[in-house]
Amino acid sequence: MQIKTFKMGQFQSINSKTVRLSILDDSVALDETYDRVERMLRNFCDTNEEKEILSCWEKAVSKKCRNPLQLWSAFGLAMRALENWGKHRSFLAFSIRQVELSQEFERSSDLFAGMDSVNSAILVADSYLNMAKGNLLMSQYKNSEKYATKCLSVLCSVRKSNLNAIKLSGYAYLYKARSNLGFSNFRNALEDLERSLRVAHDQEDRRLECFACCAMGALYLQLKDYEKGNFFSIKSCEIWTQCGSSWSTRTKVTTQLNLAEAYRKVGKIEDAMVIGEEAMKIAIENDDRSCQAYAMLCFADIHRVRKDEERSLPRYNSASGLMLDTGDQYGYMMSTIGKAKLYLQTKDYQKAIQEYFAGQKIAEAIGNKITSMHIHGELALLFQRLSNQDEARVRTLRYHRLLETMELFCGICAEPMAEKNEQLEALPCSHFFHLKCVSNNDALEMRMCPSCQKKPMKQATL
């Protein structure tokens, strides 16, 4: 038996084994259906309070859908538009409603004749993945990790026999990794990114590979291995250049901004500015406020490095406003810390402390331990400079406590990592070490990890 489903601009009779996954859509070839959904949604966004958008839009679009599956697919298209506009709170609200719709498919055996258990499971898994993405956009990493894990749990029984389920698991691992990266759980993030890359390679999914390389670059930039951070950031841009002509412009902008950040870290300021300006141009053309915010943050950081305070501060303020408007707590935190560094540079120490305190509060709220650690380190130095030894001592202790919590001490030399630009090596067990220590250590002879003594070593590659 066949069912009716909503498929990019037309209602087609397709086999019940086929389900369109909203999470995998990334084509610039937006058709008439998407245009209608976008225009209708834009009208409701312009004329209603944010908390009213969902109910008003669903009431209107339900009249145009023949069945709940079409409505479920319409939600997927709507969330794509909301993400592009930086309306992350609405995206999350829409994703919650889509999960409710997908769960109705499981509960109602007669909802669609021919809807089998595999397709039903995939709909639920895809909806959970949208929930993971929505929470990730809002820097709610605990919830994001939870729903990515739920997605994988739902897919567990069907992924071996269904191509869509396999691909979907790759994106679930990606969002789980990015959530762990938000928590500064680097070992788990690395493991999930490697799983995501395996799915990408096995399924020849270059878009997933591009996203995973982008996230891998962000991981190594946070650990201050700028060589690997640049390698993976460049790799993601190369993949987009080779394969991304049909992908959304948002993917291009995301990879560009990641590369601009990597270039800035290694002193390629002019290259970072050129890439950032191109990304901003595309973001403005597409009314992508989230990417505009990160492009503005990129400019602010560049001007700070150039010691151009007059240009840097207004851009930090603009980035902060956009981040606050979109609900991006991580981005708002980074804008606040950037201002603190700027005030420190201009020797306005009280304002620097004030901004660091504000950044610290956000870092602790979202669970971003490495940022919290770096703030404690900066405040320890600042309080020492101000002859406040008691406060400096407290901050230093908290700094080292977080280093231990994140396991950022090299298991060979016992020296800390992520304090300065130096090459690291991750072993198959996902323990990190200084590359120079691994290269010279006798543990290579025993083929055992110096930290856990459990997993066999193999040659790690960049």
Image (cartoon, grey):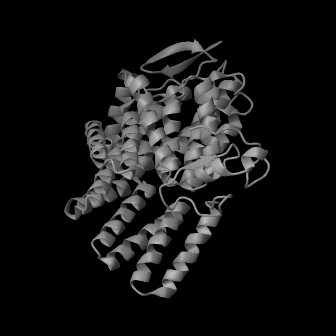
Q: Residue furthest left?
A: 310
Q: Nearer the viewer, residue 56 or 140?
A: 140
The answer to which image quadrant residue 27 occupies is top left
Q: Quadrant of the N terminus?
A: top right
The answer to which image quadrant residue 384 occupies is bottom left
Query: Is 132 drawn above or below residue 376 in the view shown?
Result: above
Q: Position of residue 451 (x, y in %)?
A: 73, 55
Q: Nearer the viewer, residue 59 or 358?
A: 358
Q: Is any part of residue 93 visible from this angle?
A: no
The residue lying at 78 percent from left, 52 percent from top is 453
Q: Position of residue 357 (x, y in %)?
A: 43, 73
Residue 164 relative to residue 237: left or right = right
Query: Is 252 drawn above or below residue 185 in the view shown?
Result: above
Q: Is any part of residue 355 visible from this angle?
A: yes
Q: Quadrant of the C terminus?
A: top right
Q: Nearer the viewer, residue 256 or 24?
A: 256
Residue 263 relative to residue 389: left or right = left
The residue lying at 48 percent from left, 86 percent from top is 389
Q: Nearer the viewer, residue 134 or 317?
A: 317
Q: Position of residue 154 (x, y in %)?
A: 69, 36
Q: Position of residue 424 (x, y in %)?
A: 57, 50
Query: Is 103 drawn above or below residue 7 in the view shown?
Result: below
Residue 274 relative to residue 194: left or right = left
The answer to which image quadrant residue 351 occupies is bottom left
The residue lying at 44 percent from left, 58 percent from top is 329
